[in-house]
Image (tube, helix red, strand yellow):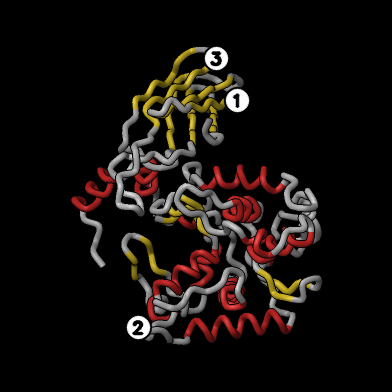
């Protein structure tokens, strides 16, 4: 963990571009301010808005009737109450798995089609990343309020919490290995302490986020999958119970914290 | 033809502040792809902005500008007019969008 000396800073500035300069020059508490004018996530949101209302799939339907928990088509505040239990699917779903469910039920896609391209790769945009950004943006400023009344929601929380503290893999790593101390960084990005009370609330509401280093918006499931990859664990399936359980744990721990996502991260 | 830009323009009565986000890969031509070969350069090298038909910004950019660049500039003017921003990259691809100054 190095301090950011003037030399390092100017080197970083010289190597980086306009957007990064704006990012480093921004005042402290960048992530607490929500989407600023210089956050390229806006471009994802614009595309997501279009995709939301574009008829696709065997049924040539849009996503406009998708029920994210507050009723069909209600987006305002929807992200604040996810993940939650859904009667129709009989499962706890986060935003991404819920969009997949809507793609399958409303648009008639197979699971494979609905999950295709869920993370973008070089030269391949992800529709999921754009749609997620659009939906999340509609909850900016609204306090997190993921429900914990249903037994399935409590079970997901418990499983997520257990996994958070569970050490495994060739390096005997758990989430807790990196995320239980204050003031740590990984390169230039702050490493949140998720083990203390209120720790998740400081960072969960700022995801999904535009990653300057990757040039794209990354969803919560991408963040978690990448953490598990860094722990040298086997790849986890998209929308797997594990990822939704971890999301449920962090979301419920963040209760009351206003959503600032889409965030801007290095 | 590139993806749409996001342009915001606001006047405080005296100055207009324009903020533009562009969607572009901005390949420098120095980066290697997964196959170990250099990825060909592809970056925006010309940006212009017009306000009510008058050129108010003219930029020559190079490969050091970041992917999905953010541009902000100010000029004298009042609300109501239209700002038109155009970028052109080295392949000749171009994109124009406009916004009304609020």
Q: Residues within 10 Å of mark 3 (few under 14, many from 20)?
A: few
Query: On screen, A32 above or below A55?
Result: below
- The answer to the question of whether label 3 and label 1 lie on touching residues, with beta carbons closer than 8 A, is no
Q: Tell me if residue A165 comes above or below residue A13 in the rendering.
A: below
Residue beneath disc 2? A171
- Spot the residue most to the left: A7
What subunit carries mark 2? A
Q: Is residue A39 above or below residue A95?
A: above
Residue at 71% x, 62% y: name it: A110
In the rendered view of the protein, which quadrant contains the C terminus of chain B? Answer: top right
**Residue at position x 42%, y 41% in the image:** B25
Q: Are marks 2 and 3 in contact (CB under 8 Å)?
A: no
**A258 and B43: which one is in front?**
B43
Q: Mark 3 falls on what kind of element?
A: loop
Does residue A152 appear in this view?
yes
The residue wearing badge 3 is B52
Q: Please tell me in which quadrant of the rendered image residue A98 appears.
A: bottom right
- Give A196 or B92, whichever is nearer the viewer: B92
Q: Return the x and y of residue A38 as percentages of the image width and height.
A: 47, 42
Is A214 in front, or is A135? A214
Q: Both on one chain, marks 3 and 1?
A: yes
Mark 2 crowdedness (10 Å alpha carbons): few <14, some 14-19, many ≥20? few
Task: Name the element at disc 2.
Answer: loop
Q: Position of residue B76 (x, y in %)?
A: 46, 19
Q: Alpha carbon of mark 1 to alpha carbon of mark 2: how far?
A: 56 Å
- Of mark 3 and mark 1, the one earlier in the sequence is 3
The residue lying toward the viewer, choosing from B85 and B25, is: B25
Relative vertical location of residue A154 with respect to residue A116 in this rendering, above or below: below
């Amino acid at each position: 963990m190095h301090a950011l000396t003037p030399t390092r800073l100017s080197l970083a500035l010289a190597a980086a571009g306009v957007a990064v300069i704006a990012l480093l020059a921004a005042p402290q508490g960048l992530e607490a301010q929500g989407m600023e004018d210089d956050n390229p996530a806006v471009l994802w949101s614009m595309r997501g808005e279009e995709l939301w209302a574009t008829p696709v799939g065997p049924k040539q339907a849009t996503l406009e009737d998708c029920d994210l928990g507050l009723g069909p088509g209600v987006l305002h505040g929807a992200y604040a109450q996810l993940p939650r239990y859904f009667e129709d699917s009989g499962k706890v779903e986060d935003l991404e798995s819920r969009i997949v469910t809507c793609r399958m039920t409303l648009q008639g896609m197979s699971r494979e089609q609905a999950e295709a391209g869920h993370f973008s790769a070089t030269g391949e945009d992800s529709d999921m990343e754009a749609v997620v950004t659009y939906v999340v943006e509609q909850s900016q400023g609204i306090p997190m309020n993921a429900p914990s009344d249903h037994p399935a929601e409590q079970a997901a929380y418990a499983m997520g919490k257990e996994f958070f503290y569970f050490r495994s893999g060739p390096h005997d790593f758990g989430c807790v290995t990196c995320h239980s101390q204050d003031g740590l960084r990984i390169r230039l990005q702050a490493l949140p302490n998720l083990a203390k009370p209120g720790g998740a609330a400081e960072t969960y509401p700022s995801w999904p986020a535009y990653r300057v280093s990757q040039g794209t918006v990354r969803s919560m499931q991408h963040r978690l999958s990448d953490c598990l990859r860094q722990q040298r664990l086997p790849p986890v399936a998209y929308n797997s119970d594990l990822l939704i359980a971890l999301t449920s744990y962090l979301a419920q721990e963040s209760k009351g914290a206003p959503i600032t996502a889409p965030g801007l991260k290095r | 033809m590139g993806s749409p830009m996001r342009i915001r323009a606001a006047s405080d009565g005296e100055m207009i502040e324009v903020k533009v986000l562009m969607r572009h890969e901005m390949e420098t031509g120095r980066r290697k792809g997964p196959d170990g070969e250099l990825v060909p350069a592809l970056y925006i090298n010309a940006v212009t902005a017009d306000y009510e038909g008058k050129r108010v910004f003219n930029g020559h950019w190079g490969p050091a500008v970041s992917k999905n660049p953010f541009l902000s500039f100010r000029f004298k003017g009042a609300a109501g007019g239209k700002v038109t921003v155009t970028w052109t990259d080295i392949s000749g691809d171009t994109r124009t969008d406009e916004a009304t100054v609020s």
